[in-house]
Amino acid sequence: MKRLSACLALLAVTAIGPALPAVAASDHVVLYSANDDTVNKLISDGFKQATGITVNVISSGSGVLFRRIASEQGNPQADVVWGVSAALLKQNVKYFQAYAVQGSDTVPAPYRDPGNLWIGTNIQVVTINRNSKAIPDAEAPQRWEDLFNAKWKGRIAYTDPANSGFSYAAATALLQAWGDNDAAWEKFGKLVGNTKVLNRSTLVFDGNGSGEYPLGISLEYAGYLWAHNGAPVKVGYPADGTVALAEGAALIKGGPDPENARKLIDYLASKPTQEMLLKATFRRPARQDVDLGAAGSMPAFGTIKVLPYDDAKWEAARADTLRRLKTTIQETR
């Protein structure tokens, strides 16, 4: 079975490199992006066609991008940062310029900054994805605690939370929902004891799609993408709730081309752009006025039970929590 990146390649043209040839300042904008190259290519091509402005994309991991932004604070080299988690955006607002993005009122309040310092552009929903060839509908787990059943041991793929932001969020959201106490940790131990803990999220996506792992603690878009490309994958929304996290964009304070930066962030947050990305990559739009029909059976966001999640708390406690998660996982091997 092809890897997830290969599936994405079927839906879009070849990705761009980390930088484009320099052009006149009035005709370009610099974007720091944590998204994959396929998404970056869609955006840069679309924005160029719409405005005539070239997007110079510098692509890297979120942490690398923010270290770069911090180091360049006295002389910013980029105009917009995009594709990073709301938790990181909240932590780094000192580097951002407030701007009321067009259509921001269509984004739910938890997924945008009240002072217009950042805007959510898509929402990642943690799901229990299932290979329906391996597990028929009648046997599908409906709740997180269904995964405690011994019959699932070794059949659930889960990314090491030390290596994955969504995996860490899934673990801590469940701990919070279960009471954030020793009993909650015992429950998490029962769940993780049935999993295969993998080093990368793509291994979870690929293993679920191929049937190597019939169940995956995964992301919504990955399931729809595999299904679109012919794999027998169904997306499961736990009835007892799940975590939904925004990824978004912000204007970098003092960036070299603020006028083009505002145009770009408006473009990223626009309804046509989010519709385009939904159709091409199954990214759930943060905007609530986008028709989800392009993603087939993707449910309206309001129908998903979303667990309360204190991302600031869990980010502050990340080091200690990761140590305990590591110990819990090791004790269940």
Image (tube, rainbow, N blue to C red):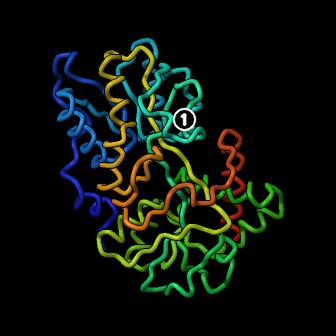
- The residue under the point 67% across, 38% down is 312
Specify few, some or many for label 1: CA neighbours under 10 Å numbering under 14, 14-19, or 20 or more. many
Q: Is residue 193 above or below residue 293?
A: below
Q: Quadrant of the N terminus?
A: bottom left
Return the residue at label 1.
112
Residue plotted at (32% across, 17% down): 259
Image side of residue 252 versus residue 229, left or right: right
Write the residue at 40% across / 57% down: 292
Residue 68 image offset from top left, x and y in percent: 43, 27
Is residue 37 or residue 130 the one in the foreground?
Answer: 130
Tell me what residue is drawn at x 47 percent, y 61 percent. 220
Front position in the image: 288 or 224? 288
User: From the image, which quarter does the C terminus lie in?
Assistant: bottom right
Q: Quadrant of residue 17?
A: top left
Residue 333 seen in the figure: no
- Residue 91 lies, with reference to residue 76, above or below; the image says below
Q: From the top left corner, tell me how far across and down residue 329 is, in percent.
A: 66, 65
Amino acid tagged 1 = Arg
